[in-house]
Protein backbone atom coordinates (compact mmCIF):
# COMPACT_ATOMS: atom_id res chain seq x y z
CA UNK A 1 0.00 0.00 0.00
CA UNK A 2 0.98 3.64 -0.24
CA UNK A 3 0.20 6.35 2.22
CA UNK A 4 -0.92 9.55 0.52
CA UNK A 5 1.59 12.39 0.79
CA UNK A 6 -0.68 14.53 2.93
CA UNK A 7 -0.58 11.78 5.58
CA UNK A 8 2.93 10.52 5.00
CA UNK A 9 4.98 13.70 4.85
CA UNK A 10 3.88 15.21 8.18
CA UNK A 11 4.90 11.87 9.72
CA UNK A 12 8.24 12.01 7.97
CA UNK A 13 8.75 15.49 9.40
CA UNK A 14 7.88 14.25 12.87
CA UNK A 15 10.14 11.18 12.74
CA UNK A 16 13.13 13.09 11.36
CA UNK A 17 12.65 15.75 14.04
CA UNK A 18 12.85 12.91 16.57
CA UNK A 19 16.20 11.91 15.12
CA UNK A 20 15.12 9.07 12.82
CA UNK A 21 16.34 8.50 9.27
CA UNK A 22 13.37 7.95 6.98
CA UNK A 23 13.21 6.41 3.51
CA UNK A 24 10.49 7.55 1.11
CA UNK A 25 9.71 6.93 -2.54
CA UNK A 26 10.17 9.85 -4.88
CA UNK A 27 7.02 11.11 -6.54
CA UNK A 28 7.03 13.64 -9.34
CA UNK A 29 9.45 14.73 -12.00
CA UNK A 30 10.77 17.95 -10.53
CA UNK A 31 14.10 16.45 -9.47
CA UNK A 32 15.09 15.04 -12.83
CA UNK A 33 17.69 13.96 -13.78
CA UNK A 34 18.91 13.12 -10.28
CA UNK A 35 15.70 11.49 -9.05
CA UNK A 36 13.06 9.72 -11.09
CA UNK A 37 9.36 9.43 -10.29
CA UNK A 38 8.48 6.15 -8.52
CA UNK A 39 11.84 4.67 -9.48
CA UNK A 40 14.12 6.10 -6.84
CA UNK A 41 13.92 6.40 -3.11
CA UNK A 42 15.72 8.81 -0.82
CA UNK A 43 16.87 8.66 2.76
CA UNK A 44 15.97 11.81 4.67
CA UNK A 45 18.01 12.57 7.75
CA UNK A 46 18.19 15.06 10.58
CA UNK A 47 20.53 17.94 9.89
CA UNK A 48 22.63 20.42 11.82
CA UNK A 49 23.89 22.54 8.95
CA UNK A 50 22.51 23.09 5.47
CA UNK A 51 24.49 23.91 2.36
CA UNK A 52 23.71 25.09 -1.13
CA UNK A 53 23.32 21.92 -3.20
CA UNK A 54 21.56 19.93 -0.48
CA UNK A 55 18.25 18.37 -1.52
CA UNK A 56 15.72 18.81 1.24
CA UNK A 57 12.13 17.99 2.05
CA UNK A 58 10.56 21.29 3.07
CA UNK A 59 7.09 22.33 4.09
CA UNK A 60 6.93 25.58 2.14
CA UNK A 61 3.34 26.31 3.15
CA UNK A 62 1.16 24.54 5.71
CA UNK A 63 0.64 21.02 4.37
CA UNK A 64 2.53 21.74 1.13
CA UNK A 65 5.78 19.80 0.88
CA UNK A 66 8.45 19.81 -1.80
CA UNK A 67 11.60 17.75 -2.23
CA UNK A 68 13.84 20.29 -3.94
CA UNK A 69 17.40 21.51 -3.83
CA UNK A 70 18.76 24.52 -1.96
CA UNK A 71 20.15 27.00 -4.49
CA UNK A 72 20.72 29.92 -2.15
CA UNK A 73 21.12 30.56 1.57
CA UNK A 74 20.86 34.13 2.88
CA UNK A 75 21.69 35.27 6.40
CA UNK A 76 22.07 31.67 7.46
CA UNK A 77 18.34 30.92 7.54
CA UNK A 78 16.54 32.24 4.45
CA UNK A 79 16.55 29.59 1.74
CA UNK A 80 15.66 29.47 -1.92
CA UNK A 81 14.77 26.05 -3.29
CA UNK A 82 14.47 24.87 -6.87
CA UNK A 83 13.71 21.50 -8.40
CA UNK A 84 16.52 20.07 -10.53
CA UNK A 85 13.94 19.29 -13.18
CA UNK A 86 12.36 22.74 -13.19
CA UNK A 87 13.21 25.38 -15.75
CA UNK A 88 12.10 28.29 -13.64
CA UNK A 89 10.21 28.77 -10.43
CA UNK A 90 11.82 28.79 -7.03
CA UNK A 91 10.43 28.42 -3.54
CA UNK A 92 11.47 30.73 -0.73
CA UNK A 93 11.43 29.25 2.77
CA UNK A 94 13.43 29.23 5.97
CA UNK A 95 15.52 26.60 7.69
CA UNK A 96 12.57 26.04 10.05
CA UNK A 97 10.58 24.71 7.09
CA UNK A 98 13.16 22.02 6.33
CA UNK A 99 11.90 18.61 7.42
CA UNK A 100 14.93 16.56 6.46
CA UNK A 101 17.95 16.54 4.19
CA UNK A 102 18.59 13.89 1.54
CA UNK A 103 21.63 11.91 2.59
CA UNK A 104 21.24 8.92 0.26
CA UNK A 105 19.86 8.42 -3.24
CA UNK A 106 18.61 4.84 -3.46
CA UNK A 107 18.36 3.28 -6.90
CA UNK A 108 16.09 0.31 -7.68
CA UNK A 109 19.07 -1.95 -8.37
CA UNK A 110 20.23 -1.50 -4.79
CA UNK A 111 22.89 1.06 -5.63
CA UNK A 112 23.25 3.79 -3.03
CA UNK A 113 24.56 7.19 -4.00
CA UNK A 114 25.61 9.19 -0.97
CA UNK A 115 24.88 12.93 -0.96
CA UNK A 116 28.39 13.45 0.37
CA UNK A 117 29.88 11.87 -2.79
CA UNK A 118 32.22 14.41 -4.38
CA UNK A 119 31.45 13.32 -7.93
CA UNK A 120 27.73 13.71 -7.31
CA UNK A 121 28.24 17.13 -5.81
CA UNK A 122 30.27 18.13 -8.87
CA UNK A 123 27.47 16.95 -11.16
CA UNK A 124 24.93 18.90 -9.11
CA UNK A 125 27.01 22.10 -9.41
CA UNK A 126 27.44 21.53 -13.13
CA UNK A 127 23.68 20.97 -13.56
CA UNK A 128 23.03 24.26 -11.79
CA UNK A 129 25.43 26.10 -14.12
CA UNK A 130 23.68 24.57 -17.13
CA UNK A 131 20.38 26.18 -16.14
CA UNK A 132 20.25 28.36 -19.30
CA UNK A 133 20.09 25.20 -21.45
CA UNK A 134 18.26 23.00 -18.94
CA UNK A 135 15.08 22.85 -21.00
CA UNK A 136 16.96 21.26 -23.91
CA UNK A 137 18.89 18.90 -21.63
CA UNK A 138 15.70 17.75 -19.94
CA UNK A 139 14.10 17.17 -23.33
CA UNK A 140 17.01 14.89 -24.29
CA UNK A 141 16.85 13.18 -20.90
CA UNK A 142 13.12 12.50 -21.35
CA UNK A 143 13.84 10.87 -24.69
CA UNK A 144 16.35 8.49 -23.13
CA UNK A 145 13.96 7.66 -20.27
CA UNK A 146 11.05 7.06 -22.68
CA UNK A 147 13.22 4.80 -24.82
CA UNK A 148 14.16 2.72 -21.79
CA UNK A 149 10.54 2.49 -20.61
CA UNK B 1 6.90 -19.39 10.94
CA UNK B 2 8.23 -16.27 12.61
CA UNK B 3 7.95 -12.53 11.97
CA UNK B 4 11.30 -11.32 10.70
CA UNK B 5 13.45 -8.90 12.64
CA UNK B 6 13.22 -5.33 11.45
CA UNK B 7 9.48 -5.09 10.93
CA UNK B 8 7.26 -3.27 13.32
CA UNK B 9 3.58 -2.54 13.47
CA UNK B 10 2.65 1.08 13.93
CA UNK B 11 -0.64 2.87 14.20
CA UNK B 12 -0.43 5.54 11.51
CA UNK B 13 -3.38 7.81 10.85
CA UNK B 14 -5.72 5.22 12.33
CA UNK B 15 -4.36 2.39 10.19
CA UNK B 16 -2.34 -0.64 11.25
CA UNK B 17 0.77 -0.34 9.15
CA UNK B 18 3.88 -2.51 9.14
CA UNK B 19 7.04 -0.60 8.34
CA UNK B 20 10.53 -1.90 7.80
CA UNK B 21 12.73 -0.52 10.53
CA UNK B 22 16.34 -1.41 10.12
CA UNK B 23 19.85 0.02 10.22
CA UNK B 24 18.54 3.03 12.10
CA UNK B 25 15.94 4.07 9.56
CA UNK B 26 12.24 3.77 8.91
CA UNK B 27 11.38 2.69 5.38
CA UNK B 28 8.13 4.31 4.30
CA UNK B 29 8.62 3.15 0.73
CA UNK B 30 7.66 -0.39 1.72
CA UNK B 31 4.69 -0.32 4.03
CA UNK B 32 2.03 -2.93 4.44
CA UNK B 33 -1.41 -2.30 5.84
CA UNK B 34 -2.94 -4.91 8.15
CA UNK B 35 -6.62 -5.28 8.92
CA UNK B 36 -7.85 -5.44 12.49
CA UNK B 37 -7.57 -9.21 12.91
CA UNK B 38 -4.15 -9.44 11.24
CA UNK B 39 -2.89 -6.65 13.52
CA UNK B 40 -4.26 -8.58 16.52
CA UNK B 41 -2.43 -11.72 15.38
CA UNK B 42 0.77 -9.75 14.79
CA UNK B 43 0.76 -8.43 18.36
CA UNK B 44 0.10 -11.90 19.72
CA UNK B 45 2.83 -13.79 17.86
CA UNK B 46 5.56 -11.20 17.46
CA UNK B 47 8.86 -12.58 18.70
CA UNK B 48 7.78 -16.21 18.74
CA UNK B 49 7.33 -19.14 16.39
CA UNK B 50 3.81 -19.83 15.23
CA UNK B 51 1.84 -21.98 12.82
CA UNK B 52 -1.60 -21.84 11.22
CA UNK B 53 -3.21 -23.84 14.05
CA UNK B 54 -1.92 -21.36 16.61
CA UNK B 55 -3.18 -18.38 14.64
CA UNK B 56 -6.55 -20.08 14.14
CA UNK B 57 -6.84 -20.68 17.88
CA UNK B 58 -6.06 -17.02 18.59
CA UNK B 59 -8.72 -15.99 16.10
CA UNK B 60 -11.40 -18.21 17.66
CA UNK B 61 -10.49 -16.85 21.11
CA UNK B 62 -10.94 -13.24 20.01
CA UNK B 63 -13.59 -13.37 17.30
CA UNK B 64 -16.84 -15.24 16.80
CA UNK B 65 -15.64 -17.47 14.04
CA UNK B 66 -15.78 -21.23 13.49
CA UNK B 67 -12.58 -23.27 13.48
CA UNK B 68 -12.58 -24.04 9.75
CA UNK B 69 -12.96 -20.36 8.80
CA UNK B 70 -10.34 -19.35 11.37
CA UNK B 71 -7.90 -21.87 9.92
CA UNK B 72 -8.51 -20.61 6.39
CA UNK B 73 -7.97 -17.03 7.54
CA UNK B 74 -4.83 -18.03 9.43
CA UNK B 75 -3.36 -19.76 6.39
CA UNK B 76 -4.20 -16.75 4.21
CA UNK B 77 -2.60 -14.41 6.73
CA UNK B 78 0.58 -16.50 6.81
CA UNK B 79 0.65 -16.55 3.03
CA UNK B 80 0.26 -12.75 2.90
CA UNK B 81 3.01 -12.17 5.45
CA UNK B 82 5.38 -14.56 3.70
CA UNK B 83 4.57 -12.97 0.34
CA UNK B 84 5.32 -9.52 1.70
CA UNK B 85 8.65 -10.75 3.05
CA UNK B 86 7.68 -9.99 6.64
CA UNK B 87 7.77 -13.56 7.92
CA UNK B 88 9.74 -16.71 7.24
Image: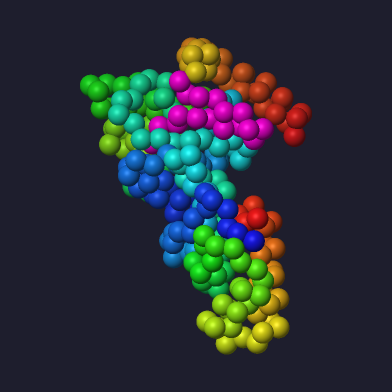
Task: Indicate left or right for B1 with A77 as reference.
Answer: right
Residue A44 rendering spot, x and y as whole percentages: 44, 36
| Residue B23 visible in the snapshot | yes
Relative vertical location of residue A56 with respect to residue A118 in this rendering, above or below:
below
Residue B75 on the magenta span: no
Residue A82 rendering spot, x and y as whole percentages: 44, 27
Name the one closer to the observer, A134 or A38.
A38
Task: Indicate left or right for A52 with B70 as reference.
Answer: left
Name the one closer to the observer, A122 or A117.
A117
Where is the N terminus of chain B found, in terms of image quarters?
Answer: bottom right
Residue A13 rendering spot, x and y as whole percentages: 37, 44
Name the one closer to the observer, A95 or B13.
B13
Q: Residue at x 25, y 27 (%)?
A: A77
Task: Indicate left or right for A52 with A144 as reference.
Answer: left
Residue A81 rendering spot, x and y as whole percentages: 39, 28
Q: Residue at x 29, y 32 (%)?
A: A95
Q: Residue at x 65, y 68 (%)?
A: B51
Relative vertical location of residue B51 with respect to residue A1 in this rendering, above or below:
below
Query: Which scheme is used to colour this image of the protein?
Result: rainbow
Q: Which residues are magenta?
A: A100-116
Residue A114 on the magenta span: yes
Query: Residue A112 is drawn in which quadrant?
Result: top right
Query: Residue A7 is drawn in which quadrant?
Result: bottom left
Task: Indicate left or right for A15 with B8 as reference.
Answer: left
Q: Residue at x 49, y 55 (%)?
A: B8
Residue furthest to the front: B49
Amino acid sequence: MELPNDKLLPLVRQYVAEGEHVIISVKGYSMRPFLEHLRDRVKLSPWTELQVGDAVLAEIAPGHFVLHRIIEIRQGRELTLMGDGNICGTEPCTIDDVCGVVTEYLRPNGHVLYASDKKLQKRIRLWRRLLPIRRALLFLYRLTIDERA
Amino acid sequence: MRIKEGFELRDICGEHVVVAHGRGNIDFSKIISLNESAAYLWHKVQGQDFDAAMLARLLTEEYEVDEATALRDAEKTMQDWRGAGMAE
